[in-house]
Image: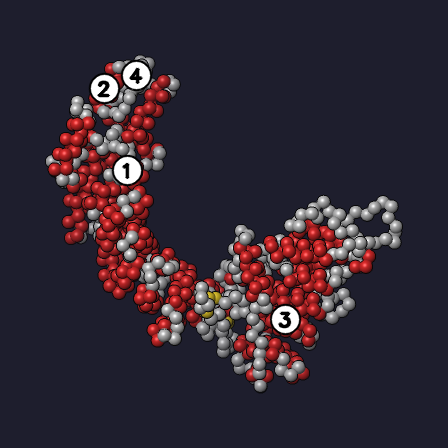
Amino acid sequence: MSSVPENHNSNDTSAHLGDHDHVGDKDNLGALLDDIEAASKVPSKRRQTSIKPTIENLTSVLYDRGALPDELARLVDLVTLTNHLDQASKGAIIKNLYPVGKLNTDSALKVVGALGHGQLKPSFPIQSLLLRWLIMVYPLLQDTSILSQTYGVLFNLLDTAAIRPQLCHVLALITRRKHVKPFRIQTILALSRQTGNDPNLTGLLRVFKNYYPEIIVGDAAKGRAATFKHPDPQWRARLDEIQQQQTEAIQDGTVRNGFAVKSAFGRQQRGAKGFFIPAVHTLHAQENSVTLEEISSPKSLADNLEKIELPTQLVAVLADPLLQKLMLLRPDAEGLSRVYNWVTACLDDVRSGDADPSLLLDMVDIIHDYVVSTKTLPPLLENFFREIFQIWNGKDKREIVIETLSFLPLTNFKDLSQTLLQPFESVLLDNTPESQLSLLTFYTSLLRQWTLTMLSSESTTLSSSAAPQSIPALIAHVNTLSLTLTQTSPTVPTHLLILDFYTLVSTRIFSSPSLLKHIPITIPPSLLIYTLHFSHSLEVVSRLCGILATYKRAWESVMVSTSPSARPLFAEERQQITTFNAFLMDLCNVLWRGRAFAVSDANAKGCLVPRALEAALRGYLKKVEPDGELVLGSVFGLSHSPVLCLQSISFLRELEDRELEGEMDISDRGLRARHAGPVTQQSLVALAGKGGLEISWQEYRAGVLRYLDERGFKGVPELMYNTMKNLMKGRQ
């Protein structure tokens, strides 16, 4: 409110616009509202300045950023309550009344309360605009059932011709079967005869007849009927933009929790190029049945689960969350067949040339949303993807296609590969590392979904399923892909993606007794293990060692008779034991025993390094270190390894620092020398002789393992403690 001068005349009731300190800030909606509310209490002839510029500023701000709930409530009061604002100003405000977030039910009730005849009611043009606004913001209502409670009030206003089109549209939105009564049908029929078959009344009558097809309405429903389209798509598009600017993304409010069908009069469900999915609608419903449109909460769905009648267009399951829940809780083979037939008809249209091939890519978005929501890809839809691969370039919507296919059901991998996966790979792969990484991501996601399927299955059914053959076949297939990637993209990110797959294999499948009981252990290829071990990333080396330690526990679990997963070894497993033992021996030789590339030990393969190359490496070291202090056997150990040397010397530095600070008592003498690094068994003896830290070679190496473990690099310590017998005893 503007301030009143002390020397005012009691008869002077003029309003001063712009007395606020904030009026210069056109984006200050609160200040603009204050000015307009003050001006609305004063007749236009008594205002000292025009209100038009303030209204223009207000509508501009509303268009730019919308109105918050408190601001919206004040604006609704301005346009519904009696005041001195002119009709043009009220109309401009209503046309720019963009809510931010959800719409308060009080605002909707105020609009309903402003309808009808009377001196205190807004003019009919304003009432018409208010109803039109209510139609456009209906999906944003906090509780759409609030309008259902005012159904009788709205219906009784149908005889008001000035607002009848908008009223019929609102009633069509909120009509449910409980609202369809004989007296209301008679009222509409009578009004229709009086108005010469008003299309809006005919449209509303058809909505009534959809709920009760058996009612007889004569020729009244056969005439031209209103379609009740969205009043202003451009307005809705702007509303979407405003909503998306906020933290809460715009979405149909009534279906956010997935327990109400999407409105048939709201936004269409479609793909990127106008591909429409029918809305949920139940025709020919019986009086004692329950339709899906009547469900509005989890309780109502649970109470009526067995009585709900399936909608007429079952293909709506691809886009409607509530129908998806119903089909999951109450599977219907005939219903899924109808969906498949609809998809097949679309494929036939593309084959015959009646539809553009791009239509299939538009359908991918719809099917993706359905599959991600239901966590299943029905086998009936696999044929759709076989058709897609004939026109797909392997790049458009790649992530969507990959995520969708990752929900393929667990079936025979050989058959699946021939029918679907090979065509998929031939299109996806384009001789680039990026496409190969995408394929690896797909197989990792596929294995993750299959693992969830196996873990949720009964152990008795698992042995007779496709899992014992398909899982090893999938791992073997990825083994080849991983080897290829180490050559085409030898980078740390690629190595980590490869390890993601084997981490899933080892920790989710071979660490589960129920799965290990039936799934043969399948190890990575030797060349892949050694390539990753000599990576220049400590994270790669650590994760690799952790995976091998998990594999070792899996082998022990299978071979120990008292284990819950004990069983006879499969033939293919016996062939892999020697190879796996070579992994363990070679890595322990490299990291712990100082015998890198040795082949004299049992099972050792020398990391598959050719003997000629080993000799060349020894010759190179002699040139670098003529005195022989650096030998090939220990050059990749804890102290000298490029990925471990920093951690090793950091451990020793911390011990020396703590000794200097008097926090530990390793020796009785003061510390007079520090180790220059790298640490060897001989250098530790020499260090102690010079008055340095006294620590044995075994204590040093065990300390480095603890140091790595404390800093999150648990793989190397885990493998050493699970492999080296002296460490096992020390840990126990």
The residue lying toward the viewer, choosing from 483 and 706, is 483
Residue corresponding to mark 2: 685
SS assignment at label 3: helix
> Mark 1 is on which residue type?
His
N-term mark: 3 or 1: 3
N-term mark: 3 or 4: 3
SS assignment at label 1: loop
Residue corresponding to mark 3: 166
Residue corresponding to mark 1: 536
SS assignment at label 2: helix
Quarter of the image for residue 407 reads bottom left
Above-or-below relation of 240 to 636: below
Residue corresponding to mark 4: 673
Left or right of 722 in this view: 301: right
Left or right of 371 in this view: 610: left
Quadrant showing the C terminus: top left
Gap in Å between the C-alphas at discs 1 and 4?
32 Å
N-term mark: 4 or 2: 4
